[in-house]
Image (cartoon, rainbow, N blue to C red):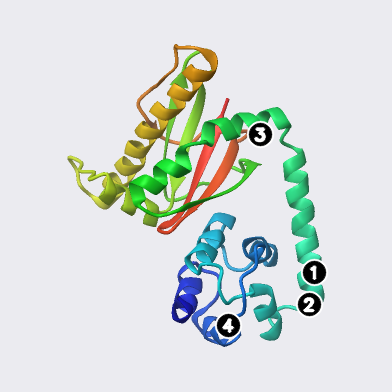
Amino acid sequence: MNSSIGELAVSHGLVTAAQAEEINALQRHVDGRWGEIAIALGVGRSTAARIEQLAWEQQLENLRLSDALVELDLISPTAVEARLAEFELTMTRDEDEIDDDARAWVDSIVDGLPRMLSRVLGSPTRVCATQAWDGKAYDHHAQAVIAGPHGCTIALSVDRGVARALADALHVQTERNTPQVRLGAAVEAMLVLYGAHVARRLDAAFGRGHHALPPSAGTPPPGAYSVGLALADGAALVVLSP
């Protein structure tokens, strides 16, 4: 996939077309911290999930972004280290803000969604670390309430590429079959499947009495937890509120 790295970088908003052409000539190995370094450098407007998606598409080949940017004189080695240190401090602070019980609860609810998305879309799904949700969302999203003694609110937010792939995979058709309505309905359809799964997990853990209400447009309020997902078709985010 070496020949397409420039196109991928441009399509994900990481670099300009001109920078991509130069970076192509400087391609090296993608290390396990590729997404973190790219976010630390503030390249483009991509989220961690989008950048991780690019790394996944490249199958961990041929690009160490920080080195390439240094060689292009876009940033100094000292600035790379400083921004990486700042990013690691931020990540540590975010992790410390989420206690172990909350993290375990999020993990138990999110468990199963990556596999469901992989089966529906026919491609692997990569999962990012749990974070306090900052209120940001992608292009299309929906939420559903899981009613019951230990219920919660779950929301799924996806970018346009993932919404389009879901609509095709789930054969979504709507009365007003405009792109916006169809893609929104696709996210709701996926949330119906995921909501039923979450209700079953809660029943298994705490006893019967949980069920998913029909999904609706919207996302939970700030103060919830979020987990980023990277897929071949784009990025997604699941947001959970107790």
Q: Which residue is mark 4?
A: 23
* Residue 233 horizontal/vertical position (percent): 40, 58
Distance in Å between CA atoms under marks 4 and 2: 16 Å
Distance in Å between CA atoms under marks 1 and 4: 20 Å
Distance in Å between CA atoms under marks 1 and 2: 6 Å
* Residue 205 horizontal/vertical position (percent): 54, 19
Q: Residues within 10 Å of mark 4 (few under 14, many from 20)?
A: many
Q: Which mark is residue 77?
A: 2
Q: Which mark is residue 95?
A: none
Q: Which mark is residue 103?
A: 3
Q: Is residue 232 left or right of residue 101?
A: left
At label 3, the amino acid type is Arg
Q: Is residue 88 above or below residue 155?
A: below
Sequence-first disc among 2 and 3: 2
At label 4, the amino acid type is Ile
Image quarter hosting the N terminus: bottom left
In which quadrant of the rendered view does residue 208 lie?
top left
Sequence-first disc among 1 and 4: 4
Check if mark 1's residue and mark 2's residue have beta carbons within 8 Å.
yes
Under circle 4, the secondary element is: helix
Check if mark 1's residue and mark 4's residue have beta carbons within 8 Å.
no
- Which residue corresponds to the image point at 47% horizontal and 72% vertical from the top-left? 8
Q: Which residue is mark 1?
A: 81
Q: Residues within 10 Å of mark 3 (few under 14, many from 20)?
A: some
